Image (tube, rainbow, N blue to C red):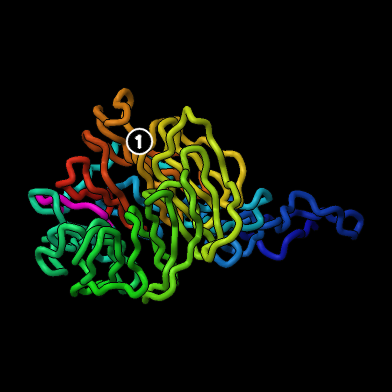
């Protein structure tokens, strides 16, 4: 009499076999399919436990080919959406969701939204949920410090009207707005040099930052966790730091060749730009170490810093280099002229083909993921070149080339 043999149950891919009786003894088990190894990329039940192998659990978190939205999900710009993808081990033994990242889709560019128009603005600074600006009157002189909701709405004047015709720069960070004046009286000083002031992010009059009066012309402000940094020019260019509450100034670097309008900082280094190289200097001062160089056929116009990388926008390319130094890597061979960074991406504007330095054919907003290589066209902007830009996890913001429009892509 033949007998059933093989697996303990007839479930999934398993099937019973038959053992033929031979002279009272069971013969070989034929036709049986025993439990196999679970494969996360298979919809079959190979291990015969009554559940499909790719059913999500701690071992197989997801199904091959699946994606899911993650992070900040944009409803107005699909190119700003982020996804996680299901990654399955080569042998199928496990599957896991990837890191949240831009999904790399291509197609129609996003339509930029206009947040404000009409008034002239400069020195844009972002501290969510507001953008902060130096507002200008009809003659181009400082009239106010303004904040503009990033979700849209009217601009609000948060400093006294008619603040000063000499306020040239602001940078918002933490709970403060720092400003630079040139000339006299913005912060209760008098002279022909510059001074730094501080006001509450909520709005108030500027107060002179103790120890910040200098005889030179301040052209750029930056901050890190503890200090305010400023670049100025006189007989040569200087980058100095001062505690955020004021106090003793410390010289980081002094040189006739560094830019006093473009530099960057992090908590460890100042990154100074010249016409032929970018160098780093410890924030408290010290040795100048070259990070990267280029030829005089290339003009670098903007610099950005991420956790690991410096990004450079130039007349011939968008390039990156490790912060520790090395050769520049060309990421986009185009006329890039303005950039900003977030922890996950470098955003930059490049002149549209044939537009040259004035962006006469308009500009293109591009994105380069920090951990990726593919650049994506996000939006287009009419001529002339945009003035300033910033970005966060949800959107990219910029002042249009006419100075009278503040625009964004994303939510």
Give the residue displayed 26% in from the left and 49% down from the top: 398
* Picture quarter with the C terminus: bottom left
Magenta-span inclusion, residue 302: no
Q: 285 or 298: nearer the eye?
A: 285
Q: Is residue 321 left or right of residue 141?
A: right
The answer to whether residue 230 is above or below residue 360 is below
The answer to whether residue 156 is above or below residue 119 is below
Percent position of residue 23, x then y? 92, 56
* Picture quarter with the N terminus: bottom right
Q: 328 or 223: nearer the eye?
A: 223
Q: Is residue 375 left or right of residue 178?
A: right
Q: Which residues are magenta?
A: 116-124
Give the residue displayed 78% in from the left and 56% down from the top: 2
Check the image and name the residue furthest to the top. Answer: 354
Q: Is residue 186 left or right of residue 139?
A: right
Percent position of residue 133, x then y? 22, 58
Check the image and name the residue furthest to the right. Answer: 23
Q: Secondary structure at mark 1?
A: strand
Q: 33 or 348: nearer the eye?
A: 348
Asked if residue 322 shows in the view, the reply is: yes
Percent position of residue 64, x then y? 53, 50
Q: 107 or 162: nearer the eye?
A: 162
Give the residue displayed 37% in from the left and 75% down from the top: 246
Q: Residues within 10 Å of mark 1 (few under 14, many from 20)?
A: many
Q: Is residue 213 left or right of residue 206?
A: right
Q: Main secondary structure of the magenta part?
A: strand
Q: Which residue bears the numbered disc 1?
A: 350
């Amino acid at each position: 009499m033949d007998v059933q043999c093989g697996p303990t149950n007839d479930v999934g891919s398993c099937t019973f076999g038959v053992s033929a009786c031979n002279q009272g003894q069971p013969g070989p088990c034929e036709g049986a399919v025993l439990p196999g190894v679970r494969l996360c990329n298979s919809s079959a039940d190979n291990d015969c436990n009554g559940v499909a192998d790719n059913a999500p659990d701690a071992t197989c978190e997801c199904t091959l080919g699946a994606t899911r939205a993650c992070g900040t999900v944009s409803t107005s710009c699909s190119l700003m959406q982020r996804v996680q993808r299901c990654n399955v081990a080569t042998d199928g033994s496990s599957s896991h969701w990837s890191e949240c990242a831009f999904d790399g889709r291509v197609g129609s560019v996003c339509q930029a939204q206009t947040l404000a128009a009409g008034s002239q603005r400069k020195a844009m600074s972002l501290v969510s949920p507001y953008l902060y600006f130096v507002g200008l009157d009809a003659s181009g002189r400082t009239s106010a410090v303004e904040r503009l909701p990033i979700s849209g709405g009217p601009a609000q004047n948060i400093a006294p009207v008619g603040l000063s015709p000499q306020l040239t720069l602001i940078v918002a960070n933490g709970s403060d707005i720092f400003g630079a004046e040139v000339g006299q009286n913005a912060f209760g000083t008098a002279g022909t040099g510059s001074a730094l002031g501080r006001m509450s992010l909520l709005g108030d009059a500027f107060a002179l930052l103790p120890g910040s009066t200098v005889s030179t012309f301040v052209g750029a402000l930056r901050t890190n966790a503890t200090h305010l940094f400023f670049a100025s020019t006189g007989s040569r260019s200087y980058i100095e730091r001062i505690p955020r509450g004021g106090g003793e100034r410390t010289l980081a670097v002094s040189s006739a060749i560094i830019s006093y309008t473009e530099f960057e900082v992090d908590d460890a280094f100042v990154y100074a730009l010249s016409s032929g190289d970018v160098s780093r200097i410890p924030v408290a001062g010290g040795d100048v170490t070259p990070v990267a160089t280029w030829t005089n056929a290339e003009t670098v116009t903007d610099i950005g810093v991420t956790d690991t990388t410096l990004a450079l926008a130039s007349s011939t390319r968008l390039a990156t280099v490790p912060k520790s130094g090395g050769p520049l890597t060309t990421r986009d061979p185009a006329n890039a002229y303005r950039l900003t960074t977030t922890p996950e991406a470098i955003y930059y504007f490049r002149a549209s083909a044939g537009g040259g330095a004035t962006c006469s054919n308009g500009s293109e907003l591009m994105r380069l993921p920090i951990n990726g290589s593919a650049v994506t066209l996000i939006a287009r902007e009419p001529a002339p070149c945009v003035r300033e830009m910033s970005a966060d996890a949800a959107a990219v913001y910029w002042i249009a080339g006419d100075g009278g429009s503040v625009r964004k892509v994303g939510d």
